[in-house]
Amino acid sequence: MQDWRDWLDRYALRRPYRRASVLLAFASVSIPLSTALLPADALYVTLWAAIAAFLGMWAYLALVALTYCRLKRGVVSSAWLILMLLPLSSIGPALPVAGPISLYPVGALIALLPVVIAWTAQDRGETGRSIAAQGSARAHNE
């Protein structure tokens, strides 16, 4: 369990988070969509679809956990993570990829909004104090 915490702490810094989040977001989308590249009559399509869905789900859960640690480390509320956890995948127009697989780009963009916010969030150590503490200190001094 300590290994996961070390990994999350190391990649919750801004620069490593950017690289890891791009990789995990790409994996969580591209692995399940790779089933569209297989011929429909192949015997292993169902097996690969199950494996791809499982791997894509774990990549997305790792992205959620890493984003939570990044938002917690930064000066931004981790409540933004709710957008990643709500079932927003079927919002907006559907783009049929292949067979029963459809992509909802609007829902995917809404779910990735916390990732973009975490990209731009400053660490608490970069500002010295949180923004709220700085604002209350300024108001107290004036």
Image (cartoon, helix red, strand yellow):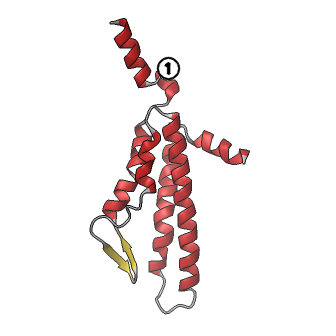
What residue is shown at x 46% (from left), y 24% (from top)?
130
- The local crowd at label 1, few if under 14, some if 14 to 19, many if 20 or more residues have their Cα within 10 Å, is few
Q: Quadrant of the C terminus?
A: top left
Image-based side of 10 in relation to 37, left or right: right
Look at 41% across and 45% down and name the residue there: 80
The x and y percentages for residue 27 are: 51, 62
Residue lying at the far right in this picture: please name it. 2
Q: Give the structural element (helix, strand or loop) at label 1.
A: loop
- Please state which amino acid type lies under the numbered disc 1: Gly
What residue is shown at x 31% (from left), y 73% (from top)?
Answer: 95
Q: Is 34 drawn above or below residue 40 in the view shown?
A: above
Q: Name the residue under label 1.
A: 128
Q: Which residue is outermost to the top? A: 142
Q: Quadrant of residue 36?
A: bottom left
Q: Position of residue 107 (x, y in %)?
A: 34, 61
Quarter where residue 44 is shown? bottom right
Task: Give whichever of 22, 127 is nearer the camera.
Answer: 127
In the rendered image, residue 86, in percent from the top left (x then y), is placed at 42, 57
Count the marks: how many?
A: 1
104 to the left or right of 9 = left
58 over 14 or under it: above or below: below
- Left or right of residue 43: residue 39: left
Against 117, is 101 above or below? Answer: below
- The residue at the point 72 percent across, 48 percent down is 1
74 horizontally vs 88: left or right: right
* Residue 108 position in % (x across, y down): 37, 60
